[in-house]
Amino acid sequence: MAQVRKQNFNAAPMGNVLQQGISGNRRLPVAIQSNSSSPGPSLAQNSAGGNNCAIQKKQKIRIGTWNVRTLLQVGKLENLKREMDVNRMGIVGLSEVRWEGEGEISSGKYKLFYSGIVQGRNGVGFIVNKRVEKSIKKVVYEGDRIIGLKLGTSVKDIFLLQVYMPTSGYEDEEIEEMYEKIGDILDREGRGCIKMVIGDWNAEVGEGEEENIVGPFGYGKRNERGERLIEFCKERSLIIGNTWFENPKRRLYTWKSPGNRYRKQIDYILIEDRFKNGMKRVCTLPGADIDSDHNLLMAEVNFRMKKVHKGNRRKKWNLEKLKGKSQVVGEKIAERIKTEGVTSIEEQWKNIREGIKEVVKEEIGFEEGRIAKKPWVTREMLEKMDERRKFKSRTDEEGKKRYRKLNNELRRETEKAREKWLEEECKEIEELEKKGRTDLMYKRVKQTTWDKKCKVGRKCEIEDKNGEIITDEKEVANRWKEYIEDLYNSHENKNREMIEQEWEVREDEIGPEILKEEVILAMKEMKNGKAVGTDEIPIEVLKCLDDRGIQEIVKLCNRIYTTGEWPKDFVRTVMIPIPKKQGTRKCEEYRTISLISHAAKIMLRILNRRLGRKMEENEICAL
C-alpha cells in the first residue's frame, strides 16, 4: 500500500465526518477511519446495503484514466476489458478512443460511453463495470476531447470529467479555450456535486510542492503547461491527487517516449480540495498493457454510491419461434382466457391480456440480448494478451524484442480471425437470401455490421417555454407533457364541430353489433413487425387466435361499442420524440410517434371503416 507524508489538509476531524460533515448539516459521502496516515484513509460504505447500493459496505472503487492510443484496432476493446478485469477497475476514463460520433455500447459485463467527431482522431470515453453502471445518472458528451459522467451516491453526486488536452504542438489560445470549456461544464453540470477531473493533460507539474495543490511526490520538471494546470486548480479549488502519495518511481510516470529514452508524468487525477480525504491511493499500474505509450493511472476512492433506478428496457418477444407453433399458441390462449362472470370491461380485458402473455411467455419467450463480445476473439488470443503484458515493463533488449513479436503476432491473428468470421457470416446471409427469408437476411446483416455507432439519447435536456435549458428528468417530462397538451389543444382544434352525445342519437341510427368478420378483416390489414403498445402484445400473436380467441375479442369490442367505456391500455399511448436535426433542444424541432395497443388498433380500424361508409352514404344522399 502506498505511503504518504503527513500533511495539514485543513479538513474536518475524520471521526466526525459522518455526523457533522464539512459545514452545517451537509455530509461528506464518505466515513473515514481516524487511524490512517494517508490523505485517503479507509472509507466505510453505506451501512444500508441491500439492493439500493451499487457499492457494498467497506468496498473500494477504482477510478482510472488511460490514453489507449485507439480502439479502432481489431481486438483492442477485448484487450481493454481484460485489463479492467485483471486490475479490478470500476471506471476508466479513456483518451484517444478515435471513434466517430457519440453513444454507448454494452460489451459483456462492461458498458462503454464514447464521444468523438472524426473517425481516427482524438475521441474520449468511459468504460464502467455493471456495478458502477447502476449508479450512472447522466452522460455529458462534449465533443472529441471532453466527456462527463454524473454518478449517484447516498449523499452527494459525483461529477467525473475525462479530458484529453491538446499536445504541445497546439497554440496557447486553444489550450485556454479548453480550460474555459472545462470550467463552464463544471459550473453547469457539476453544481452541488463532488467534482473529479481526470485525463491526459499533456502538462508536467513536476516535483516541488505548491500550496495545497501539488504534493511532495511529483515527477519530473515543471513546464509552462504545468503552471497553467496549477493555476486552473487554484481557480477551481482542486488538488492534483498523483502528487500526494509516495510511490516508487515506476508508479509515478504515466508516459514514456519512443524507445523508452525518457519518461514523464502528464496524466493526472484532480479532485476538489474539500473531498480529498475520500481518495485513498493514487498510482500508475505499469503492468497494464494495451499497446500504448501511456500507463494506466488509478485512484482508489470509497464514496458511497447508490443504485439509480432507471426505466427497465422492454424485452422483445422471440416471434421467430411463433411461425412453427402458431396453431398451438392460438389454442392454448383460447383455453387460458376466462371471461365468464366478469362485470367490468377493465377486468374482461385484463383476463384476455394476461392469458395471451402467459401463453406467449411459455411457448416462445423473449429474444436473447445481443452478444457484444467479438465472436472471433478466441481463448488463445486472450492468453497471448496475458503473455504480452508480462514483457511490457522489461527494459532489456530481449524483453523488448519479445514484446514486439507477440504484439505483431496478436495483431495478425485477430485480423485473420475476423476476416474468417466475416466470410462465414456472408455465406449464411447468402443462404438465407436463396431460401427467400429476406426478413432473417436483413436481421443477420444488421447484427453482423452492427458496431459502436448505435446512438443513445444525446442528453436529458430541453428548453422550456422561456428558452431556459432544463436537465432534471421530471422537469423534462413535464415540459413534454405541456408541449403535447398545447399541440393537441391548439386554437385550430378548438373550432372543430362538436360530436353529438349518445343520448342525442336516434335508436334507428345506432349501428349494428360488431361482427367477427370485421375483427378478422381489421387484423388481416395490420402489418407485422410493428412496435407493441403498453400491453406488450404483438399483432402476430393476435393473428394466431382461433375462433374461440377471436370471439373473445369480438365480445370486448362490442362492449366498448355499446357502453362507450375503453380499457386503460386502449387509451394509453407511449410517445417517442425523434429529433429532426442533431443536437436540438426545442420540442418544436422533434417529431413524435405514438405506440398504441394493437387490440385498440383493431377497434379503431373497425370504427374508421364504419365512419367511412357512413360518410359515403351521406354524400350519395346529398347528390
Image: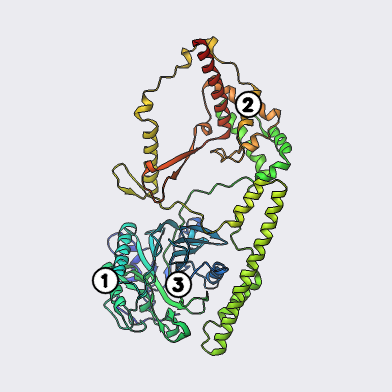
Q: Is residue 241 above or below residue 139?
A: below
Helix, strand or loop under label 1: helix
In the picture, the disc for residue 234 is 1
- Marks 1 & 2, CB-CB < 8 Å contact: no
In the picture, the disc for residue 195 is none
Is 251 on the left-hand or right-hand side of 194? right
Q: Is residue 442 visible?
A: yes
In the picture, the disc for residue 67 is 3
Is 498 on the left-hand or right-hand side of 413? left
Crowdedness of circle 2 by 10 Å Cα count: few (<14), some, many (20+)? many
- Marks 1 & 3, CB-CB < 8 Å contact: no
Q: Is residue 248 visible?
A: no
Q: How far apart are the two marked residues, 1 and 3, measured between alpha carbons?
A: 25 Å
Q: Callout 3, which amino acid?
A: Asn
Is 50 on the left-hand or right-hand side of 589? right
Q: How far apart are the two marked residues, 3 and 2, measured between alpha carbons?
A: 61 Å
Residue tagged 2: 519
Q: Nearer the viewer, residue 40 or 321?
A: 321
- Marks 3 & 2, CB-CB < 8 Å contact: no
Measured as percent of width and height from the top left, residue 83 is found at 54, 72
Helix, strand or loop under label 2: helix
Q: Is residue 561 above or below residue 453?
A: above
Q: Quadrant of residue 491?
A: top left
Mark sitting earlier along the chain (1/2): 1
Q: How far apart are the two marked residues, 1 and 2, measured between alpha carbons?
A: 72 Å
Q: Callout 2, which amino acid?
A: Val
Q: Nearer the viewer, residue 232 or 8?
A: 232
Measured as percent of width and height from the top left, residue 595 is found at 52, 38
Q: Quadrant of the N terminus?
A: bottom left
Q: Callout 1, which amino acid?
A: Lys
Helix, strand or loop under label 3: strand
Crowdedness of circle 1 by 10 Å Cα count: few (<14), some, many (20+)? some
